[in-house]
Amino acid sequence: MPLSKAWQLYPANPEKQKLLSEALGISRITAQILVNRGVENLESAQIFLSPSLKNLPSPFLIPNMDLGVRRVMEAIQKKESITIYGDYDVDGLTATALLATFFKEIGVDVTTYIPDRVKEGYGLQAPALKSLQAKGVSLVITADCGTKSHTALLEAKNIGLDVIVTDHHELDATPPPAFAFINPQLLPKGSPEQNLAGVGVAFFLIMALRQKMREEKFFTQGEPNLKQHLDLVAMGTIGDMVPLTGINRILVRFGLQELSQTKKPGLIALKEISGLALETEIDCSDVGFRLAPKINAGGRISKASLGLDLLCSTDLERAAKLAKILDQCNQDRQTMQEKQVKQAIQQVGEKKSLTGLVVASPDWHPGIVGLIASKLTEKFYTPSIALSLSGELARGSARSISGLHIVEILVECKDLLEQFGGHASAAGLTLKTAQIKNFEERFANVLERKMAENPFTPTLRVDCELQLLEIHDKLLEEIQTLKPFGIKNPEPVFLSRQLQFQDMRVVGEKHLKFKVSDNFTQLNAIAFNMVDSHPQTPEKGDVAFVPQWNTYQDKTTIQLKVKDLKKS
């Protein structure tokens, strides 16, 4: 049963509502949503509602970008051997594919390298770099990794291998010893580029390279069109669950348009196997729940190179075969995940405290532990860590809740860890199996202290209160202009009080379907996965919901997607 959530209603701001509503010709409801998202003045609202690629900042604002670009230009001129070294998740794979595709487009041959999740683990590995150097590679460009790979980078330096790190993960106290370290986290806090995904940083690198090449008259037969590659940028950005605000909003908005009409055989085949027609308008949920998981599945339980091969494929027949393999990998992953999540929940049931969860098993696949941790965090609303045991070492993933920075928590446990790194909400870690008990105690103690300072409860942010009669086609059309929805720009949630529930029934075993009405209006409602959490007897209640169009038998009506219900 889902945990009961506290509803937090954004405070109304009539002045800013009026300003934005009158200037932009939008309803006060939509104006209030903009204010709730931190869009409070006319200029920022115009950019939010009508983003343009011209609003992207100069890529050279990211520290060390100029140094990295000069080194790449030198390598191109001297015909050096270049390798793109990427991570095995969808962000790293799309970033690697993006760089490889760009270099191919400008006539520069590069090779790619994706580490094995189980045998090598996350980040740069010294043996792999030595092997590349032995094959004649003199320049490595990373994609979505390298920030914490100090040992491997030092080894690369010692053997004369230059490495340009492009990454977006949290910084260490000291920067890695790379030839050029390109990471937007080096910028002052609050800089618009800081929220870029790994693929976003890679895109800024090719933006900078194209600009430098243009200045040096490199292009004799026309320069590459980077906009067509925003389909890859959107895939990785959405898949990595970074905030969809500012620069990311622009990249994803145009990237989804490109993805909807992509000419890349790999993405065409991926859409087809996912049941998305070629001309279907793709949105964030399509990427997050249908496309990205298949790309990730190769790296989780098979070979990450499958996803990269698909993304780089230029042959539709081969792409279709790769998409079919990845689809099967994803189905196998889902079966494996369901079984292992049940085992993890069983372990949780044996624990005395639910403050921070650490679960472990030698039977869990290393590619699934992040998903296990996510499910535990979602179910118990506490930071969770799932570990896969392999002899003396335990490798795992951590997931956190809003307001608790998981990397900062792991820093306080670093003497018990062999390796760790990640974002505020997700991280990877390695520790010795013998240290698990000590780590679990320290992890719980750190969390207890932080939670005592600031108790954390699951919350549902509500944009504003509405009467049912205020929900109409024009409002839904305006809400569409706020897309793409995602982290930091969620679908708008509204609240209506003291509604009558009628015709409540169970559909699909887990969901509730019913009608809601007040004195003037009746609308259909659907509550996904809520069959166990609320009584099925019709009664009055308050409803938090997202209004949406629902098409059934060629008839389109408005329905409420229920986020939560409470008795009036």
Image: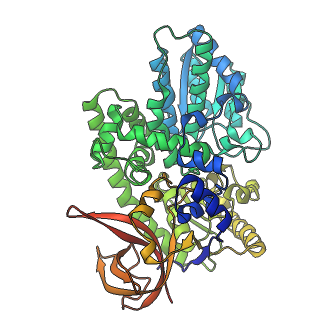
State which quadrant residue 143 falls in.
top right
At 42% from the left edge and 35% from the top edge, which residue is drawn? Answer: 308
Rendered position, 142 above or below 497: above
Choose between 527 and 465: the one closer to the eye.
Answer: 465
Q: Residue at x 61, y 57 (%)?
A: 20
On the question of residue 434 being in view, the answer is yes
**Left or right: 13 in relation to 117:** right
* Residue 377: x %, y % from top left: 56, 67
Q: Position of residue 403 (x, y in %)?
A: 68, 64
The correct choice, above or below, for 333 with respect to 279 in the image is: below
Above or below residue 567? Residue 427 is: above
> Going by the image, does 486 lie left or right of 434?
left
Residue 286 drawn at (x, y percent): 39, 51
Determine whether 326 is above or below 559 in the image: above
Residue at 57% across, 68% down: 463
Toward which corner of the image does residue 355 lie, by quadrant?
A: bottom right
* Residue in the foreground of this view, choosing between 199 and 21: 21
Residue at 49%, 68% in the rendered image? 344
Q: Nearer the viewer, residue 48 or 342?
A: 48
Q: Is residue 400 visible?
A: no
**In the rendered picture of this protein, how many numbered marks are placed on residues?**
0
